Image (tube, rainbow, N blue to C red):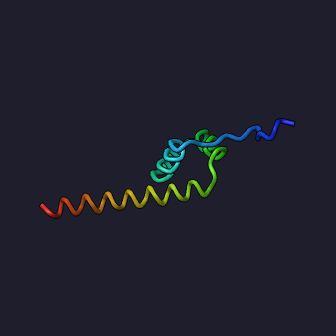
């Protein structure tokens, strides 16, 4: 018995999640990094973070265009 702890699993932190989403967005990934990320991330985490990052990116572009066009 191991006292209820799960052996061999590792949770990914928010920075690792952000790094995974951004590298997937730009298409820059190493196979070693992919294996490490796959071990600690759940698909729902990646989907939610991906939607948030894409929405923030689109809003940043729209805001930038709005300020440039206003001048």
User: Which of the two residues, 26 or 40, is positioned nearer the viewer here?
Assistant: 40
At 53% from the left and 58% from the top, the residue drawn is 48
User: Which of the two residues, 48 or 1, is positioned nearer the viewer here?
Assistant: 1
Q: Residue furthest front?
A: 3
Q: Residue furthest right?
A: 1
User: Which of the two residues, 2 or 45, is positioned nearer the viewer here?
Assistant: 2
Q: Residue furthest top?
A: 2
Q: Is residue 27 above or below residue 16?
A: below
Q: Is residue 49 above or below residue 13?
A: below
At 56% from the left and 42% from the top, the residue drawn is 13
Q: Residue 16: x, y in percent?
A: 53, 42
Q: Quadrant of the N terminus?
A: top right
At 80% from the left and 41% from the top, the residue drawn is 4
Q: Residue 18: x, y in percent?
A: 49, 47
User: Which of the two residues, 27 or 48, is positioned nearer the viewer here?
Assistant: 48
Q: Quadrant of the C terminus?
A: bottom left
Q: Residue 12: x, y in percent?
A: 60, 42
Q: Residue 24: x, y in percent?
A: 51, 51
68 lies left or right of 52: left
């Amino acid at each position: 018995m191991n006292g209820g702890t799960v052996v061999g699993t590792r949770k990914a932190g928010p920075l690792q999640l952000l790094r995974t989403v951004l590298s997937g967005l730009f298409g820059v990934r190493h196979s070693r990094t992919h294996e490490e990320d796959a071990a600690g991330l759940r698909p729902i985490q990646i989907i939610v973070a991906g939607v948030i990052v894409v929405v923030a990116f689109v809003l940043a572009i729209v805001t930038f265009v709005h300020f440039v066009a206003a001048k």
